[in-house]
Amino acid sequence: MSIWRQAYLAPPASALRFAIKATLAMLLALYVALWLDLERPYWALISAAFLQLRPLSGMVIEKGLSQLAGTLAGCLAGTLIMAAFVQVPPAALGTLTLWIMLCTYVSSLQHGNAAYGCIMASVTAMLIVVIAAATPQALFGVAVERLTELSLGALCATLVSALLWPVRVRDHLIAQADTALTQAFTHAAQRLGDAAPGSRQASLTAALAPLAQLEADSRAARYEDPEGAGRIRASHLLGHRTLRLMATLHALQQLLEDGRVPAQAAGRRLIDEAAALFSAYGDEAATRARLQALRHRVLAALEAVAAADSDTPGDLAHQRLLIGLREALGHALVMLDARAAIAAPGRQRLHGTAPTRHRDRLSALLNALRAGGAFALLAWAWLATGWEGAMGAMMIATLLSALFAGFERPVTASLLYLKGLLAAIPSALLFGHVLLAPANGFPLLLTPLFLGLLGAAEPRLMGPCLAFVIGNIMLIMPGNAMSFAVDDFANRALGMLVGVSTVVMGFRLLPGLPTELRRRRLIRATVHDLRRLYRRPLHQAEARFSGAMVDRLLDLARHDDDLPEARRHLFALGLTGLDLGYAGLLLRRRLDGLEDPTVEAAKRRLFAALATAYAASADGRRDSRLTPASEALLNALAAHPRVSPREHRLLEGLLRRLDLALAAQAGRHPDADPAPLAAEAG
């Protein structure tokens, strides 16, 4: 059965509930707006429609607050622009263009509902300036009307979401955490086993995607109940520990694949048991008990190795393997605790720092230029022709240019929106003019709205179905004094088609940063973070690094998928950067308390050398500054009384492993010269 047939002929109960809730919220917003005799009540419908796209109670409240804040900012900006340039429309539109560019730039740097608030600030200001340009004496009234209409839609959506079949953020977060945990443990089993690189990459990206969504969605939990803050902290902790588990597994795999010192049989057996345990993850309590039992055995093996006090390369490698396995099992146990705390925060109090997401300011600037150019082109056409349909075109262009800028394929998203809009034209003509004209009231509007929302419940159909809903509203424009003239309808339809076409043209002319440039900027950002790992407090440095690396790993994985299989190396490059970052954080945990100026200077030099060597490995080269920087740190530690000889040897092994990891990464580059790399590895 096709996706369209399934959505409409066999819809799940959740889709029916979503469509009924959203339709009732929009109908409530419409009738309250009509009762208040608002000038454009259809904006209340559009506001309610956007807020119901993710009808989780906490998310609707968070998005409603973001929309209200953006609407207030847009009202203030639009009023100030018209107050300053009411006599000079070109200057007003030019200033409005700059405001739209600023809002688009900021929204491109934000995630979640904060970005939506920035988009609403640009759309609201545009509506006030364009509408008030015709009647400048009614400027304040126009601003109040837009604020009232948009706020009314948000209020109705929030009310219906909370009272009718409420869907809690808590349940959504638990589902996301379960998915991330299952995929992370699957990846752990593959890393410790002999799975193919392609399957390891697939399982890791499958774990990172829900993890990134979990981080973004968890902020809405604070609006549901007093335990929301605990769920947010647990979500942050789950994200941090999952990234640390990935880095530890990457290091363990390097130790296992190091042919110079084969793993001892006892260590290999423990690794195999851990792989089997991760692969069999199902019952949470049973998995926790087995993880704890295995970790106790690893600790006992570590105590036996320490008691033997052997300095042979094999024993030191065995100890490093056991330490890595102990850390991996510890991270897995904390991940299970974080999952339990998301479900019931009151049982245990966990601490987690909010991550800092990756932000590309050059991409944000390009998005701002595209949105500003689309609006300026349509504004110039409006000034030159006085075309009444231009307002709809400018609104659509302003909204979609910012909304689709964050999509992976914005042109495809724009064309899907265009298809939904084309389907809305005959629907709006039938329901809004043929059937609604002789009717008393607006119940007939329920049919197209419900049908569009029923399809929008399926994520793969949300684009065209949402366009169908918005198109029906904008083309019918229900109100107390609505027009049934066909020429007005045709004007509005043409305006919306021109607006979407302008957006498509903008994305084709300015398609985004080239893939190679985006790749280099991702690597440069990772190098930047590696250089500055020592500048912030330890918990802040980890939160900043781990949050940004989730986004970068997902982006590098997408770029890797676009390359031929023989040239794929970008995802491994991201994992190497993750490994270097967490190794640097591990060094800080062990060395920050020494308070020795010589050690501190050597540590900073090492971080700079690691960042430089990582940048070189991305181009298939080796950098010679890492070895002297490592030796300088080891010499400084050898003279320190609080560093035991055994700990010194373990740190020496860690630095040697990082050097080998960078050599291996340089060798993965398609254009690398294998001769010097093989000589250094040998």
Image: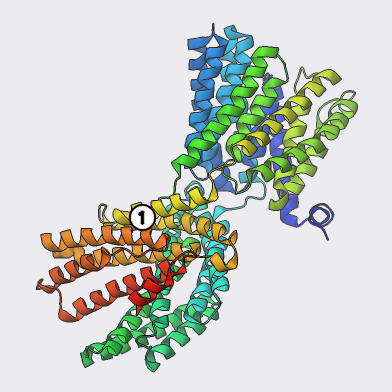
Q: Hey, which quadrant is residue 205 in on the image?
A: bottom right
Which part of the image, by quadrant, shows the C terminus? bottom left
Query: Relative to 183, is 679 on the left or the right?
Result: left
The colour scheme of the drawn protein is rainbow
Residue occupying the point 27% across, 60% down: 609
The count of marks equals 1
Q: Position of residue 669 (x, y in %)?
A: 47, 65
- The three-letter amino acid code for the residue at tag 1 is Val
Q: Position of residue 129 (x, y in %)?
A: 58, 17
Query: Relative to 488, is 200 on the left or the right?
Result: left
Q: Hey, which quadrant is residue 549 in on the image?
A: bottom left
Residue occupying the point 57% across, 25% down: 124
Asked if 245 appears above or below 75 in the picture, the reply is below
Q: Is residue 316 visible?
A: yes
Residue occupying the point 56% across, 46% down: 59
Query: Relative to 363, is 564 on the left or the right?
Result: right
Asked if 678 appears above or below 583 in the picture, the reply is below
Q: Hey, which quadrant is residue 464 in on the image?
A: top right
Asked if 165 appears above or below 252 in the picture, the reply is above
Residue, disc 1? 527
For the residue pair 629 and 76, the one nearer the viewer reads as 629
For the residue pair 224 and 208, the one nearer the viewer reads as 208
Q: Position of residue 220 (x, y in %)?
A: 51, 48
Neighbor class of circle 1 (other Cα within 10 Å; few <14, some 14-19, many 20+) is many
Task: Label 1, secondary structure: give it.
Answer: helix
Q: Position of residue 54 (x, y in %)?
A: 62, 47
Asked if 449 appears above or below 326 in the picture, the reply is above
Q: Is residue 458 visible?
A: no
For the residue pair 553 and 613, the one nearer the viewer reads as 613
